[in-house]
Amino acid sequence: MLDNGAFHKAADLIIPNNIALLFIPPYSPELNPAEKIWWRMKRAFTGKLHKSLDAVSLFIKEEVMKLTKEIVAKTCKFDYIFLSNFWTKLY
């Protein structure tokens, strides 16, 4: 599932035969399950002061390390994903 970013449509992008690209409508991040992970990261990041880029990198690494399969499944769950056999089952 991809947004309509130009980098997802690059002419030299190699897409394996077993992958299907599904583009969501422009300006609709609420339809992209991965965006919910970013929202989660932004909420954790807001209001914190980091004294260096290394500190920011460390913060991001620590937040990513907190993500378990269960947290990702719960955070990214959209009911429409499970309405069709087309989608891969998460668990």
Image (tube, grey):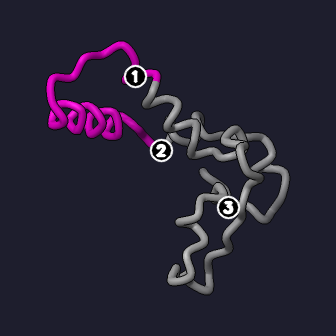
Could you tell me residue 54's position as x and y percent?
A: 15, 37
Of callouts 1 and 3, the N-terminal one: 1
Tell me the crowding category of disc 3: few under 14, some 14 to 19, or many 20 or more residues within 10 angstroms, Cα based: few
The residue sitting at 55% across, 75% down in the picture is 10
Image height of 67 relative to 89, above or below:
above
Q: Amino acid at mark 1?
A: Ala
Q: Is residue 60 left or right of residue 32?
A: left
Q: Amino acid at mark 2?
A: Lys
From the viewer's side, name the closer residue of 38 and 74: 38
- What secondary structure is found at the residue carrying circle 2? helix
User: Quadrant of the rendered structure where residue 3 is?
Assistant: bottom right
Report, in whole angstroms, how far the alpha carbon at label 3 lies from the one at label 2. 15 Å
Residue 1 - label: none
Task: Farthest residue to the bottom: give it.
Answer: 17
Residue 88 - label: 3
Report, in whole angstroms, how far the alpha carbon at label 1 lies from the one at label 2. 19 Å
Bounds of the magenta span? 43-68
Tell me the crowding category of disc 2: few under 14, some 14 to 19, or many 20 or more residues within 10 angstroms, Cα based: few
Q: Amino acid at mark 3?
A: Thr
The residue sitting at 21% across, 22% down in the picture is 50
Of callouts 1 and 2, the N-terminal one: 1
Residue 69 - label: 2
Image height of 86 relative to 80, above or below:
below
- Mark 1 sits on what residue? 44
The residue sitting at 46% across, 22% down in the picture is 43
Can residue 59 be found in the magenta stretch? yes
From the viewer's side, name the closer residue of 37 and 74: 37
Image height of 1 relative to 62, above or below:
below
Of callouts 3 and 2, the N-terminal one: 2
